[in-house]
Amino acid sequence: MATCPPYPTTPPRPHWWQRGWVRYGALTTLLAISGLVILALVREQTGTQGFLVGLGLAVLPVPLLIAAFRWLDRVEPGPWRNLVFCFAWGACAAALIAIIANSFATRWIATATADPAGADTLGATVIAPVVEESAKAAAVLLVFLFRRRDFTGIVDGVVTAGVTATGFAFTENILYLGNAFGTDQLTGDSGFASVTAATFFVRVVMSPFAHPLFTVLTGIGFGIAALSTGRHHLRRALLPLAGLLLAMGMHALWNGSAAFGEYGFLAVYGAFMVPCFGLLTWLVIWTRQRELRTVREELPAYVMAGWLAPAEPHTLASMHARRLARQYARRHAGKQAARAVAQYEAYATSLAFLRQRGRKGRAGPDFAVRERELLDALWHRRDVARPALDHAARATAPPPVTPWPGYGTPGSHAGYGYGYGYGYAAAAYAGYGYAARPGGFAPVAPYGGYGHGHPAPAAPAFTPAWVPAPFPAHARSRPAYPSAHPAPHQPLPRRP
Protein backbone atom coordinates (compact mmCIF):
# COMPACT_ATOMS: atom_id res chain seq x y z
CA MET A 1 0.00 0.00 0.00
CA ALA A 2 1.36 3.40 -0.92
CA THR A 3 2.04 5.66 2.00
CA CYS A 4 3.14 8.77 0.13
CA PRO A 5 0.69 11.30 -1.23
CA PRO A 6 0.13 11.08 -4.97
CA TYR A 7 1.04 14.76 -5.45
CA PRO A 8 3.88 16.81 -3.95
CA THR A 9 2.93 18.65 -0.78
CA THR A 10 5.06 21.71 -1.58
CA PRO A 11 4.45 23.85 -4.65
CA PRO A 12 7.13 23.71 -7.33
CA ARG A 13 9.69 26.48 -7.35
CA PRO A 14 8.99 29.12 -9.99
CA HIS A 15 11.22 29.44 -13.00
CA TRP A 16 14.02 31.96 -12.59
CA TRP A 17 12.33 34.34 -15.06
CA GLN A 18 9.11 34.29 -13.01
CA ARG A 19 10.83 35.74 -9.96
CA GLY A 20 9.93 39.35 -9.28
CA TRP A 21 13.43 40.67 -8.67
CA VAL A 22 14.64 39.18 -11.97
CA ARG A 23 11.90 40.91 -13.96
CA TYR A 24 12.34 44.22 -12.15
CA GLY A 25 16.09 44.04 -12.64
CA ALA A 26 15.82 43.27 -16.34
CA LEU A 27 13.28 46.04 -16.91
CA THR A 28 15.32 48.57 -14.96
CA THR A 29 18.47 47.64 -16.87
CA LEU A 30 16.66 47.96 -20.20
CA LEU A 31 15.29 51.40 -19.35
CA ALA A 32 18.64 52.58 -17.96
CA ILE A 33 20.51 51.53 -21.10
CA SER A 34 17.86 53.15 -23.28
CA GLY A 35 18.13 56.35 -21.25
CA LEU A 36 21.90 56.51 -21.62
CA VAL A 37 21.75 55.86 -25.36
CA ILE A 38 19.00 58.43 -25.94
CA LEU A 39 20.93 60.95 -23.85
CA ALA A 40 24.01 60.44 -25.98
CA LEU A 41 22.05 60.69 -29.25
CA VAL A 42 20.21 63.87 -28.27
CA ARG A 43 23.38 65.50 -26.97
CA GLU A 44 25.20 64.59 -30.18
CA GLN A 45 22.51 66.25 -32.31
CA THR A 46 21.97 69.37 -30.19
CA GLY A 47 25.31 69.94 -28.49
CA THR A 48 25.80 70.46 -24.79
CA GLN A 49 24.35 73.97 -24.64
CA GLY A 50 21.42 73.07 -26.84
CA PHE A 51 20.72 70.00 -24.73
CA LEU A 52 20.69 72.00 -21.50
CA VAL A 53 18.43 74.71 -22.99
CA GLY A 54 16.09 72.11 -24.44
CA LEU A 55 15.98 70.22 -21.15
CA GLY A 56 15.15 73.34 -19.18
CA LEU A 57 12.32 74.34 -21.51
CA ALA A 58 10.93 70.85 -22.16
CA VAL A 59 10.50 70.05 -18.48
CA LEU A 60 8.06 72.94 -17.92
CA PRO A 61 4.80 71.22 -19.04
CA VAL A 62 5.67 67.84 -17.51
CA PRO A 63 4.50 68.54 -13.91
CA LEU A 64 1.22 70.02 -15.16
CA LEU A 65 0.45 67.03 -17.39
CA ILE A 66 1.39 64.49 -14.71
CA ALA A 67 -0.75 66.35 -12.17
CA ALA A 68 -3.69 66.39 -14.61
CA PHE A 69 -3.51 62.63 -15.21
CA ARG A 70 -3.03 61.97 -11.52
CA TRP A 71 -6.14 64.06 -10.80
CA LEU A 72 -8.13 61.91 -13.22
CA ASP A 73 -6.94 58.83 -11.34
CA ARG A 74 -7.90 60.07 -7.86
CA VAL A 75 -11.01 57.87 -7.58
CA GLU A 76 -8.97 54.67 -7.59
CA PRO A 77 -5.33 55.82 -7.75
CA GLY A 78 -2.92 53.37 -9.24
CA PRO A 79 0.52 52.76 -7.77
CA TRP A 80 3.22 55.27 -8.50
CA ARG A 81 5.55 52.57 -9.79
CA ASN A 82 3.27 52.11 -12.81
CA LEU A 83 3.41 55.82 -13.62
CA VAL A 84 7.19 55.91 -13.18
CA PHE A 85 7.55 52.95 -15.53
CA CYS A 86 5.25 54.53 -18.13
CA PHE A 87 7.06 57.86 -18.07
CA ALA A 88 10.48 56.18 -18.23
CA TRP A 89 9.35 53.95 -21.09
CA GLY A 90 8.07 56.91 -23.07
CA ALA A 91 11.10 59.11 -22.39
CA CYS A 92 13.74 56.41 -22.92
CA ALA A 93 12.67 53.21 -24.69
CA ALA A 94 9.93 54.61 -26.95
CA ALA A 95 11.96 57.69 -27.85
CA LEU A 96 15.00 55.56 -28.70
CA ILE A 97 12.93 53.25 -30.90
CA ALA A 98 11.39 56.25 -32.67
CA ILE A 99 14.70 58.00 -33.33
CA ILE A 100 16.39 54.90 -34.73
CA ALA A 101 13.42 53.66 -36.77
CA ASN A 102 12.45 57.08 -38.15
CA SER A 103 16.03 57.89 -39.17
CA PHE A 104 16.52 54.51 -40.85
CA ALA A 105 13.18 54.67 -42.70
CA THR A 106 13.67 58.26 -43.88
CA ARG A 107 17.21 57.51 -45.08
CA TRP A 108 16.02 54.41 -46.92
CA ILE A 109 13.17 56.29 -48.64
CA ALA A 110 15.52 59.12 -49.65
CA THR A 111 17.97 56.63 -51.14
CA ALA A 112 15.26 54.68 -52.95
CA THR A 113 13.47 57.73 -54.41
CA ALA A 114 16.38 60.18 -54.70
CA ASP A 115 14.08 62.82 -53.23
CA PRO A 116 15.22 63.90 -49.73
CA ALA A 117 12.44 66.49 -49.34
CA GLY A 118 9.76 63.98 -50.26
CA ALA A 119 11.35 61.43 -47.95
CA ASP A 120 11.14 63.83 -45.02
CA THR A 121 7.47 64.55 -45.72
CA LEU A 122 6.62 60.87 -46.14
CA GLY A 123 8.57 59.97 -43.01
CA ALA A 124 6.77 62.60 -40.92
CA THR A 125 3.25 61.76 -42.12
CA VAL A 126 3.43 57.98 -42.55
CA ILE A 127 6.47 56.43 -40.87
CA ALA A 128 6.65 58.51 -37.69
CA PRO A 129 3.01 58.03 -36.59
CA VAL A 130 3.21 54.26 -37.02
CA VAL A 131 6.55 53.88 -35.26
CA GLU A 132 5.94 56.33 -32.43
CA GLU A 133 2.42 55.24 -31.56
CA SER A 134 3.43 51.58 -31.64
CA ALA A 135 6.39 52.26 -29.35
CA LYS A 136 4.21 54.14 -26.88
CA ALA A 137 1.46 51.52 -27.05
CA ALA A 138 3.96 48.89 -25.93
CA ALA A 139 4.00 50.41 -22.43
CA VAL A 140 0.20 50.30 -22.22
CA LEU A 141 0.26 46.68 -23.37
CA LEU A 142 2.83 45.72 -20.73
CA VAL A 143 0.81 47.31 -17.92
CA PHE A 144 -2.36 45.69 -19.27
CA LEU A 145 -0.74 42.24 -19.30
CA PHE A 146 1.44 42.27 -16.19
CA ARG A 147 -0.39 44.75 -13.93
CA ARG A 148 -3.90 43.61 -14.77
CA ARG A 149 -5.12 44.20 -11.23
CA ASP A 150 -4.29 47.90 -11.61
CA PHE A 151 -5.83 48.16 -15.10
CA THR A 152 -9.60 47.91 -14.72
CA GLY A 153 -11.21 50.50 -16.98
CA ILE A 154 -11.06 53.49 -19.29
CA VAL A 155 -9.54 55.89 -16.77
CA ASP A 156 -6.64 53.51 -16.11
CA GLY A 157 -6.03 53.25 -19.85
CA VAL A 158 -6.12 57.03 -20.26
CA VAL A 159 -3.72 57.63 -17.38
CA THR A 160 -1.28 54.93 -18.47
CA ALA A 161 -1.23 56.09 -22.08
CA GLY A 162 -1.13 59.78 -21.17
CA VAL A 163 1.84 59.47 -18.83
CA THR A 164 3.72 57.38 -21.40
CA ALA A 165 3.10 60.00 -24.08
CA THR A 166 4.16 62.76 -21.68
CA GLY A 167 7.54 61.08 -21.25
CA PHE A 168 7.90 60.66 -25.01
CA ALA A 169 6.99 64.31 -25.68
CA PHE A 170 9.49 65.39 -23.02
CA THR A 171 12.41 63.75 -24.85
CA GLU A 172 11.17 64.88 -28.26
CA ASN A 173 10.84 68.48 -27.06
CA ILE A 174 14.43 68.40 -25.80
CA LEU A 175 15.55 67.40 -29.29
CA TYR A 176 13.45 69.99 -31.12
CA LEU A 177 14.21 72.85 -28.75
CA GLY A 178 17.90 71.98 -28.63
CA ASN A 179 18.12 71.98 -32.44
CA ALA A 180 16.23 75.29 -32.55
CA PHE A 181 18.70 76.81 -30.11
CA GLY A 182 21.58 75.59 -32.27
CA THR A 183 20.00 77.26 -35.29
CA ASP A 184 19.69 80.52 -33.40
CA GLN A 185 23.34 80.29 -32.40
CA LEU A 186 24.30 80.09 -36.07
CA THR A 187 21.99 82.88 -37.27
CA GLY A 188 22.37 85.16 -34.26
CA ASP A 189 18.61 85.42 -33.63
CA SER A 190 17.32 85.91 -30.11
CA GLY A 191 14.22 86.94 -28.22
CA PHE A 192 10.71 86.47 -29.56
CA ALA A 193 11.93 86.44 -33.16
CA SER A 194 14.12 83.39 -32.58
CA VAL A 195 13.43 79.85 -33.76
CA THR A 196 13.67 78.67 -30.15
CA ALA A 197 10.83 80.97 -29.07
CA ALA A 198 8.64 79.88 -32.00
CA THR A 199 9.32 76.20 -31.31
CA PHE A 200 8.60 76.67 -27.62
CA PHE A 201 5.30 78.42 -28.36
CA VAL A 202 4.09 75.77 -30.81
CA ARG A 203 5.18 72.65 -28.91
CA VAL A 204 4.96 73.68 -25.24
CA VAL A 205 2.34 76.44 -25.13
CA MET A 206 -0.10 75.56 -27.93
CA SER A 207 0.11 71.78 -28.08
CA PRO A 208 1.56 70.17 -24.95
CA PHE A 209 -1.38 67.76 -25.08
CA ALA A 210 -0.70 66.57 -28.66
CA HIS A 211 1.20 63.35 -27.95
CA PRO A 212 -0.95 62.48 -24.91
CA LEU A 213 -4.07 63.05 -27.01
CA PHE A 214 -2.90 60.61 -29.68
CA THR A 215 -1.87 57.85 -27.30
CA VAL A 216 -4.94 58.27 -25.08
CA LEU A 217 -6.97 56.78 -27.94
CA THR A 218 -4.91 53.61 -27.60
CA GLY A 219 -5.43 53.70 -23.85
CA ILE A 220 -9.19 54.00 -24.29
CA GLY A 221 -9.13 50.91 -26.50
CA PHE A 222 -7.30 48.95 -23.83
CA GLY A 223 -9.63 50.34 -21.16
CA ILE A 224 -12.76 49.18 -22.98
CA ALA A 225 -11.09 45.81 -23.52
CA ALA A 226 -10.50 45.59 -19.77
CA LEU A 227 -14.24 46.08 -19.21
CA SER A 228 -15.14 43.29 -21.64
CA THR A 229 -15.89 39.81 -20.37
CA GLY A 230 -13.47 36.95 -20.83
CA ARG A 231 -15.74 35.33 -23.41
CA HIS A 232 -15.28 38.12 -25.95
CA HIS A 233 -11.70 37.34 -26.94
CA LEU A 234 -12.03 38.84 -30.41
CA ARG A 235 -13.39 42.11 -29.03
CA ARG A 236 -10.63 42.29 -26.45
CA ALA A 237 -8.07 41.97 -29.23
CA LEU A 238 -9.70 44.32 -31.75
CA LEU A 239 -10.50 47.23 -29.44
CA PRO A 240 -6.87 48.08 -28.56
CA LEU A 241 -5.93 47.68 -32.23
CA ALA A 242 -8.73 50.06 -33.24
CA GLY A 243 -7.55 52.61 -30.68
CA LEU A 244 -3.98 52.30 -31.97
CA LEU A 245 -5.09 52.86 -35.57
CA LEU A 246 -7.07 55.96 -34.54
CA ALA A 247 -4.01 57.27 -32.70
CA MET A 248 -1.87 56.75 -35.79
CA GLY A 249 -4.43 58.49 -37.99
CA MET A 250 -4.70 61.53 -35.74
CA HIS A 251 -0.92 61.69 -35.42
CA ALA A 252 -0.52 61.54 -39.19
CA LEU A 253 -3.07 64.34 -39.65
CA TRP A 254 -1.25 66.50 -37.13
CA ASN A 255 2.18 65.93 -38.70
CA GLY A 256 0.83 66.47 -42.21
CA SER A 257 -0.94 69.73 -41.38
CA ALA A 258 2.10 71.72 -42.47
CA ALA A 259 1.61 70.42 -46.02
CA PHE A 260 -1.94 71.80 -46.22
CA GLY A 261 -0.87 75.34 -47.03
CA GLU A 262 0.10 78.44 -45.10
CA TYR A 263 -2.75 78.12 -42.59
CA GLY A 264 -3.04 74.34 -42.64
CA PHE A 265 -1.55 73.97 -39.18
CA LEU A 266 -3.94 76.49 -37.62
CA ALA A 267 -6.92 74.96 -39.44
CA VAL A 268 -6.16 71.45 -38.17
CA TYR A 269 -5.42 72.79 -34.71
CA GLY A 270 -8.64 74.79 -34.39
CA ALA A 271 -11.07 72.57 -36.30
CA PHE A 272 -9.83 69.16 -35.22
CA MET A 273 -7.30 69.01 -32.37
CA VAL A 274 -9.04 71.35 -29.91
CA PRO A 275 -12.53 69.77 -30.35
CA CYS A 276 -11.06 66.27 -30.00
CA PHE A 277 -9.21 67.33 -26.87
CA GLY A 278 -12.42 68.78 -25.40
CA LEU A 279 -14.42 65.67 -26.30
CA LEU A 280 -11.91 63.28 -24.76
CA THR A 281 -11.65 65.46 -21.65
CA TRP A 282 -15.42 65.32 -21.23
CA LEU A 283 -15.40 61.55 -21.75
CA VAL A 284 -12.75 60.99 -19.09
CA ILE A 285 -14.47 63.27 -16.55
CA TRP A 286 -17.81 61.54 -17.24
CA THR A 287 -16.12 58.18 -16.70
CA ARG A 288 -14.70 59.42 -13.41
CA GLN A 289 -18.16 60.46 -12.22
CA ARG A 290 -19.48 57.07 -13.27
CA GLU A 291 -16.82 55.43 -11.12
CA LEU A 292 -17.97 57.47 -8.12
CA ARG A 293 -21.53 56.35 -8.78
CA THR A 294 -20.33 52.75 -8.82
CA VAL A 295 -18.81 53.25 -5.37
CA ARG A 296 -22.10 54.64 -4.07
CA GLU A 297 -24.13 51.76 -5.51
CA GLU A 298 -21.93 48.77 -4.71
CA LEU A 299 -20.64 49.43 -1.19
CA PRO A 300 -24.01 49.30 0.67
CA ALA A 301 -23.82 45.50 0.41
CA TYR A 302 -20.81 45.61 2.73
CA VAL A 303 -22.62 48.03 5.03
CA MET A 304 -25.33 45.40 5.52
CA ALA A 305 -22.63 42.85 6.34
CA GLY A 306 -20.96 45.10 8.91
CA TRP A 307 -17.71 45.78 7.09
CA LEU A 308 -18.48 49.47 6.50
CA ALA A 309 -20.31 52.13 8.46
CA PRO A 310 -23.70 53.27 7.10
CA ALA A 311 -22.62 56.66 5.74
CA GLU A 312 -19.39 55.47 4.18
CA PRO A 313 -20.74 54.62 0.68
CA HIS A 314 -21.92 58.19 0.17
CA THR A 315 -18.83 59.66 1.79
CA LEU A 316 -16.49 57.58 -0.36
CA ALA A 317 -18.48 58.55 -3.47
CA SER A 318 -17.62 62.23 -2.98
CA MET A 319 -14.13 63.51 -3.72
CA HIS A 320 -14.81 66.54 -1.52
CA ALA A 321 -15.75 64.32 1.42
CA ARG A 322 -12.67 62.18 0.87
CA ARG A 323 -10.46 65.22 0.99
CA LEU A 324 -12.14 66.43 4.18
CA ALA A 325 -11.54 63.03 5.78
CA ARG A 326 -7.83 63.10 4.95
CA GLN A 327 -7.49 66.65 6.21
CA TYR A 328 -9.27 65.78 9.45
CA ALA A 329 -7.00 62.78 10.00
CA ARG A 330 -3.88 64.81 9.27
CA ARG A 331 -4.95 67.59 11.60
CA HIS A 332 -5.74 65.29 14.53
CA ALA A 333 -3.28 62.42 14.13
CA GLY A 334 -0.59 63.36 11.64
CA LYS A 335 0.56 62.37 8.18
CA GLN A 336 0.58 58.65 8.87
CA ALA A 337 -3.10 58.69 9.78
CA ALA A 338 -3.94 60.72 6.68
CA ARG A 339 -2.07 58.17 4.59
CA ALA A 340 -4.05 55.37 6.23
CA VAL A 341 -7.33 57.16 5.42
CA ALA A 342 -6.24 57.59 1.79
CA GLN A 343 -5.43 53.88 1.62
CA TYR A 344 -8.80 53.04 3.16
CA GLU A 345 -10.53 55.10 0.48
CA ALA A 346 -8.53 53.43 -2.29
CA TYR A 347 -9.19 49.91 -0.99
CA ALA A 348 -12.90 50.59 -0.60
CA THR A 349 -13.06 51.89 -4.17
CA SER A 350 -11.26 48.82 -5.48
CA LEU A 351 -13.71 46.67 -3.52
CA ALA A 352 -16.67 48.41 -5.18
CA PHE A 353 -15.20 47.91 -8.66
CA LEU A 354 -14.40 44.29 -7.89
CA ARG A 355 -17.96 43.61 -6.78
CA GLN A 356 -19.34 45.29 -9.88
CA ARG A 357 -17.20 43.08 -12.11
CA GLY A 358 -18.33 40.01 -10.18
CA ARG A 359 -21.98 41.02 -10.43
CA LYS A 360 -21.64 41.45 -14.20
CA GLY A 361 -19.81 38.18 -14.67
CA ARG A 362 -16.42 39.76 -15.43
CA ALA A 363 -14.62 38.68 -12.24
CA GLY A 364 -11.61 36.46 -12.63
CA PRO A 365 -10.90 33.21 -10.81
CA ASP A 366 -9.16 35.11 -8.01
CA PHE A 367 -12.31 37.05 -7.11
CA ALA A 368 -12.71 35.58 -3.59
CA VAL A 369 -9.00 35.94 -2.80
CA ARG A 370 -8.88 39.55 -3.96
CA GLU A 371 -12.07 40.41 -2.06
CA ARG A 372 -10.66 38.93 1.12
CA GLU A 373 -7.44 40.92 0.69
CA LEU A 374 -9.38 44.16 0.29
CA LEU A 375 -11.66 43.44 3.26
CA ASP A 376 -8.66 42.65 5.45
CA ALA A 377 -6.98 45.88 4.36
CA LEU A 378 -10.12 47.86 5.28
CA TRP A 379 -10.46 46.07 8.60
CA HIS A 380 -6.90 46.88 9.68
CA ARG A 381 -7.44 50.59 8.97
CA ARG A 382 -10.99 50.96 10.27
CA ASP A 383 -10.07 52.51 13.63
CA VAL A 384 -8.08 55.23 11.87
CA ALA A 385 -10.41 55.89 8.95
CA ARG A 386 -13.91 55.73 10.42
CA PRO A 387 -13.72 58.80 12.69
CA ALA A 388 -12.36 60.83 9.78
CA LEU A 389 -15.01 59.56 7.37
CA ASP A 390 -17.70 60.18 9.99
CA HIS A 391 -16.53 63.79 10.29
CA ALA A 392 -16.59 64.15 6.50
CA ALA A 393 -20.08 62.63 6.32
CA ARG A 394 -21.45 65.08 8.87
CA ALA A 395 -19.63 68.01 7.20
CA THR A 396 -21.01 67.25 3.73
CA ALA A 397 -24.50 66.00 4.68
CA PRO A 398 -27.43 68.16 3.51
CA PRO A 399 -29.13 70.17 6.25
CA PRO A 400 -32.37 68.86 7.79
CA VAL A 401 -35.56 70.07 6.13
CA THR A 402 -38.38 71.42 8.31
CA PRO A 403 -41.71 69.76 7.36
CA TRP A 404 -44.61 71.86 6.10
CA PRO A 405 -47.27 72.67 8.66
CA GLY A 406 -50.15 70.27 8.55
CA TYR A 407 -48.12 67.36 7.19
CA GLY A 408 -47.39 65.66 10.48
CA THR A 409 -45.67 66.52 13.69
CA PRO A 410 -42.16 67.90 13.66
CA GLY A 411 -40.83 64.64 15.00
CA SER A 412 -42.44 62.52 12.30
CA HIS A 413 -39.97 63.71 9.65
CA ALA A 414 -36.89 64.05 11.83
CA GLY A 415 -33.74 63.70 9.82
CA TYR A 416 -35.39 64.24 6.43
CA GLY A 417 -32.23 65.71 5.02
CA TYR A 418 -30.25 62.70 6.18
CA GLY A 419 -32.80 59.91 6.06
CA TYR A 420 -33.76 60.43 2.42
CA GLY A 421 -30.45 61.83 1.27
CA TYR A 422 -28.33 59.01 2.65
CA GLY A 423 -30.86 56.29 3.11
CA TYR A 424 -30.32 56.21 6.90
CA ALA A 425 -32.26 57.90 9.65
CA ALA A 426 -30.38 60.59 11.52
CA ALA A 427 -31.85 60.34 14.99
CA ALA A 428 -28.47 59.54 16.48
CA TYR A 429 -26.17 60.91 13.82
CA ALA A 430 -23.42 61.99 16.18
CA GLY A 431 -20.65 59.43 16.06
CA TYR A 432 -21.85 56.08 14.72
CA GLY A 433 -25.16 55.97 16.52
CA TYR A 434 -27.25 55.42 13.41
CA ALA A 435 -30.75 54.36 14.30
CA ALA A 436 -31.66 53.14 10.83
CA ARG A 437 -32.78 49.72 12.07
CA PRO A 438 -33.14 48.02 15.44
CA GLY A 439 -29.86 46.96 16.91
CA GLY A 440 -27.79 49.30 14.76
CA PHE A 441 -24.19 50.25 15.16
CA ALA A 442 -22.98 51.09 18.62
CA PRO A 443 -21.99 54.72 19.18
CA VAL A 444 -18.32 55.47 18.67
CA ALA A 445 -16.52 58.17 20.56
CA PRO A 446 -14.91 60.92 18.50
CA TYR A 447 -11.16 61.07 18.03
CA GLY A 448 -9.79 60.05 21.38
CA GLY A 449 -6.63 58.84 19.76
CA TYR A 450 -6.38 56.58 16.75
CA GLY A 451 -6.89 52.92 17.38
CA HIS A 452 -8.71 53.24 20.72
CA GLY A 453 -12.33 53.14 21.67
CA HIS A 454 -13.82 52.19 18.32
CA PRO A 455 -15.97 49.07 18.55
CA ALA A 456 -16.06 47.53 15.10
CA PRO A 457 -19.44 46.44 13.74
CA ALA A 458 -19.69 42.96 12.36
CA ALA A 459 -22.08 40.67 10.55
CA PRO A 460 -22.62 37.01 9.74
CA ALA A 461 -21.62 35.64 6.38
CA PHE A 462 -23.39 36.56 3.20
CA THR A 463 -26.03 34.13 2.01
CA PRO A 464 -25.05 31.94 -0.95
CA ALA A 465 -27.14 34.13 -3.28
CA TRP A 466 -25.08 37.18 -2.27
CA VAL A 467 -27.90 38.79 -0.35
CA PRO A 468 -26.39 40.59 2.67
CA ALA A 469 -27.72 39.51 6.02
CA PRO A 470 -28.65 42.06 8.73
CA PHE A 471 -25.88 42.87 11.16
CA PRO A 472 -26.23 42.14 14.90
CA ALA A 473 -26.50 44.77 17.57
CA HIS A 474 -23.04 45.17 19.08
CA ALA A 475 -20.91 42.38 17.66
CA ARG A 476 -17.21 43.02 18.04
CA SER A 477 -15.84 40.08 16.06
CA ARG A 478 -14.68 40.38 12.49
CA PRO A 479 -17.47 39.90 9.93
CA ALA A 480 -17.37 36.63 8.04
CA TYR A 481 -16.20 36.62 4.46
CA PRO A 482 -18.71 36.27 1.63
CA SER A 483 -19.18 32.69 0.59
CA ALA A 484 -19.59 33.12 -3.18
CA HIS A 485 -19.37 35.48 -6.11
CA PRO A 486 -22.18 37.96 -6.59
CA ALA A 487 -24.53 36.32 -9.03
CA PRO A 488 -24.78 38.30 -12.29
CA HIS A 489 -28.60 37.99 -12.31
CA GLN A 490 -29.08 39.26 -8.77
CA PRO A 491 -30.34 42.85 -8.37
CA LEU A 492 -28.36 45.37 -6.39
CA PRO A 493 -29.02 45.24 -2.65
CA ARG A 494 -31.20 47.97 -1.28
CA ARG A 495 -29.67 50.47 1.10
CA PRO A 496 -30.99 50.13 4.66
Image (tube, rainbow, N blue to C red):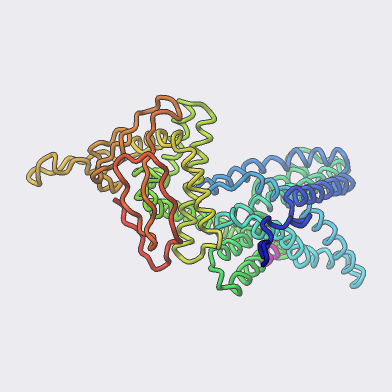
Count of numbered badges drawn on the protein: 0
Front residue of this view, candidates 32 and 428: 428
Front residue of this view, candidates 297 and 300: 300
Q: Position of residue 316 (x, y in %)?
A: 42, 45
The range drawn in magenta is 248-253
- Magenta segment, principal secondary structure? helix
The stretch drawn in magenta includes residue 252? yes
As displayed, is residue 404 above or below residue 250? above
Front residue of this view, candidates 315 and 486: 486
The stretch drawn in magenta includes residue 491? no
As displayed, is residue 324 above or below residue 236? above
| Residue drawn 51% across the image and 48% down it | 374
Q: Position of residue 332 (x, y in %)?
A: 45, 25
As displayed, is residue 463 above or below residue 29? below
* Outermost left residue: 406
| Residue drawn 43% across the image and 51% down it | 295
Q: Position of residue 468 (x, y in %)?
A: 35, 55
* Outermost front residue: 1
As displayed, is residue 35 above or below residue 251? above
Q: Which quadrant does the N terminus fall into?
A: bottom right
| Residue drawn 55% across the image and 73% down it | 231
